[in-house]
Amino acid sequence: MISVLKPIDETILEHTIGYEQLAVDLTAALAQREPDPYVKIALDFALLEDFDHLYRYSDLAYLEYGEKMEYLVNHYTEIMPGRPTIAQHRFPEDNIRRYIDFKTACPITKLNIAIITAAEQQTMNYYMNVVNLYCSDLGRKLYQEIASLEEQHVSQYESLLDPNLSWLENLLLHKYNECYLYYSCFCDEIDPCIKKIWEYHFIQEVSQLHKAAQLLEKYEGKCWQQVIPNGEFPELLKLRPNKEYIREIEKNTVEWTSKLEDYVDVNCLCNEDVFYQFQDAVNGNECEVPSHQVIDSLINQTGMDYRFEIAPHPVEALRNRQVDNTCIARS
C-alpha cells in the first residue's frame, strides 16, 4: 500500500536518491536526539557516509541524464562530498559495535537503533535487487559498491541491538517500533488522504502489539512493561533542518574510521593497520573504484563535479570541484 504511493514515472535512480536523502535526514534527526553517546557517535559516523552516497548518485544522474538532483531533494539537503565512499571500505571486524543493554537503555535509544537498522536494511536490499536493472555499466558498478557499504551500516547498527533479548521480547519491540513510526507519521502528515493510511496501519500494528504482549506473557511469563515503557510514546519522530548539523559533523569527523568497536582518526592508525591492508586489497587501483569513476568521468566531461552547497565546503580539502579527493579519511 505504501510503496505504490511513489510516483509512477519515478526512475530507479530517482528512487535511489530519495533513499539516500531519507538516510541523511533520518540519521541526522535520530543523532540529534540520541542520549547515549556511543549510539550517537555511530549515527554521526554513518551519516557522513550516506551523505557521500547521495553526492555520488546525484553526480551519476547529472553525468548520464543532465539532471540536477537539488530539485528532487527540494533543497532540503545539500549535495556535496561526505566521507569519500572509497574510504568507507573497511575490514569486516571493524564494522561491529558493542551492544547496548536494553534493560537500562532509554526508550528513545531502543527506538533509534531499531529504526535505523530497518532503514539501512531496506536500502541495502533495494540496491542489491535493482543493480541488474540499471541501464549503464558504470551505474551497476556504483550500486554494487554502495550496496556493500550499506551492508556494513546494517552490521554496525544491528550489532548495537541487545542479543540477550528473547525472540518474543524482540517481537514486542518490533511491533512497538512500528506503532511508534506510524503514529509519528500520522501526527506529522498534512495530506488528509495519506494521513488516513498512517492511521489505518497504526491501528493494525496496535492490534499486533497486543498479540505480541499476550504471547510474551503466555510463553515467558513476562509482562510487556518489562520490555517497553508505560504511558505515552517518547518524543515522536520528526524530520528537521539538518544542513548546519551535517556541516559541523563533517568538519569534525570526516577523517574518522572505525577500529574494532570504537572510532579513531585514520591518521592515528599505524601503517600496518588492517584498514590499510584492506584498502590496498580492495582499492589497489583506485581508478577502477566506481564511486571515484563517477566523479572523475563527470569532471572530465564538464570540468567539475556537480554539487548543491549553501556555502563553501566545511572541509577545505574537499572544496576543489575539479579533483575527486580520494586521500582524505584514507591515507
Image (cartoon, helix red, strand yellow):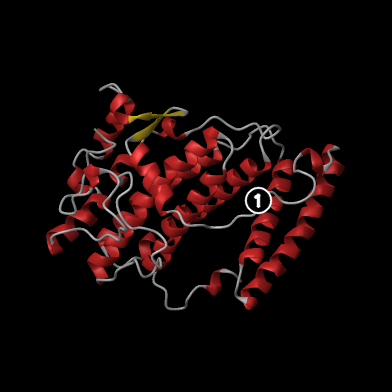
Residue 106: give x, y in percent of width and height.
Answer: 67, 38
- At a point 58% along the width and 35% down the height, the residue shown is 36
Q: Residue at x 81, y 53 (%)?
A: 211
The secondary element bearing badge 1 is classed as loop
Q: Answer above or below: position of 139 versus 37.
A: below
Label tally: 1
Location of the N terminus by quadrant is: bottom right
Q: Can residue 147 be seen by looking at this rendering?
A: no
Q: Where is residue 91 in the image (x, y as percent from the top left)?
A: 37, 33
Q: Is residue 17 above or below residue 114?
A: below
Relative vertical location of residue 121 with respect to residue 106 in this rendering, above or below: below
Nearer-the-camera pick, 179 or 240: 240
Report x, y in % for residue 41: 48, 36
- 182 horizontally vs 291: left or right: right
Q: Which residue is drawn at 75% across and 40% down?
A: 227
Q: What residue type is labelled 1?
A: Glu
Up-down relation of residue 111 to residue 4 (above or below): above
Residue labelled with disc 1 = 235
Residue 315 appears at what percent x and percent y?
Answer: 27, 43
Check the picture and name the quadrant holding the C terminus.
top left
Frontmost residue, 11 versus 43: 43
What residue is shown at x 28% (from left), y 30% (from top)? 276
Q: Can residue 314 be seen in this view?
A: yes
Residue 282 in the figure: left or right of residue 234: left
Crowdedness near tag 1: few (<14), some (14–19) or many (≥20) residues, C-alpha within 10 Å:
few
Seen from the viewer's position, the closer of residues 47 and 245 is 245
